[in-house]
Image (spheres, rainbow, N blue to C red):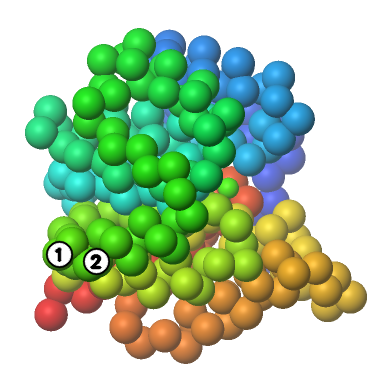
Amino acid sequence: MDKKYISLTDPLYEYLQKVSVREPDILRRLREETAGDPLAMMQISPDQGQFMTLLARLLNARRYLEVGVFTGYSTLSLALALPSDGKITACDISEEWTSMARRYWKEAGLDEKIDLRLAPAADTLASLIAKGSEGSYDLAFIDADKENYQVYFEYCLKLVRPGGLILIDNVLWGGQVIDESNREESTVAIREFNLNLHQDNRVHISLLPVGDGLTLAAKPLH
Ligand code: CA
């Protein structure tokens, strides 16, 4: 094998899921209900959810910040993994999508752990900083409107603690990042975000081909 990476085929991806994913029943049901939505592809995959919860466990995370909730699969995955005194701040603007999310959070008995803020995420993040939450989150996940990724990243970098981690989703954007003829606003924004982050010495980074591309950006401890 001369390649240093493997391209997943559908059967190989199915195998990967079969031998690694341990999806709780409530997450499976949430995923299946979301599958009826035309925007269901916005939901993270079970293997990505499990990977994120593993990272949360490795960090001993107690506080998780989510930018972009959709129907709450990642939120609930993390809520299940955080300790009983764990807290989640979740930002979204959609009443409709998050109402499904809230139904499942409540059923899991974890709604008390999750502080849902229905407002533009940049406003919520700015108010968290204004209220003294700087450096208080262990883990952040950015998965909202791509045009504002850099804005969200700057806020998250302030809000996570030294040694904390920021995850950025969809950084390969279905492969469109390398199609220079694609000048869509979201594509251009992700491309610029990736280039900026590559030069950003404030964080240690790794871009993984998980889901639609997931970048890990760690804030140095010292
Ligand atoms: Ca996403």
Query: Residue 216 falls in which quadrant of the image?
Result: bottom left
Q: Could you tell me residue 3's position as x and y percent?
A: 66, 64
Judged left or right of residue 110, residue 48 is right
The image quadrant where one finds the C terminus is bottom left
Height in image: 201 above or below 16? below
Q: Secondary structure at mark 1?
A: loop
Q: Could you tell me residue 102's position as x and y percent?
A: 41, 23
Amino acid on which the number 1 mark rests in the picture: Gly
Height in image: 109 above or below 148? above
Judged left or right of residue 96, residue 125 is left
Residue at the spot of label 1: 132
Height in image: 65 above or below 94? below
Q: Which mark is residue 129?
A: 2
Q: Secondary structure at mark 2?
A: helix
Spatial CA distance of label 2 from label 1 is 5 Å
Residue 129 appears in the picture as rendered: yes
Please rate how many residues cluster around mark 2, counting C-alpha atoms within 10 Å: few if below 14, some from 14 to 19, many from 20: some
Q: Could you tell me residue 190's position as x and y percent?
A: 63, 69
The residue nearer to you, when weighing 101 against 7, is 101
Residue 161 appears in the picture as rendered: no
Judged left or right of residue 57, residue 38 is right
The residue nearer to you, when weighing 98 against 118, is 118
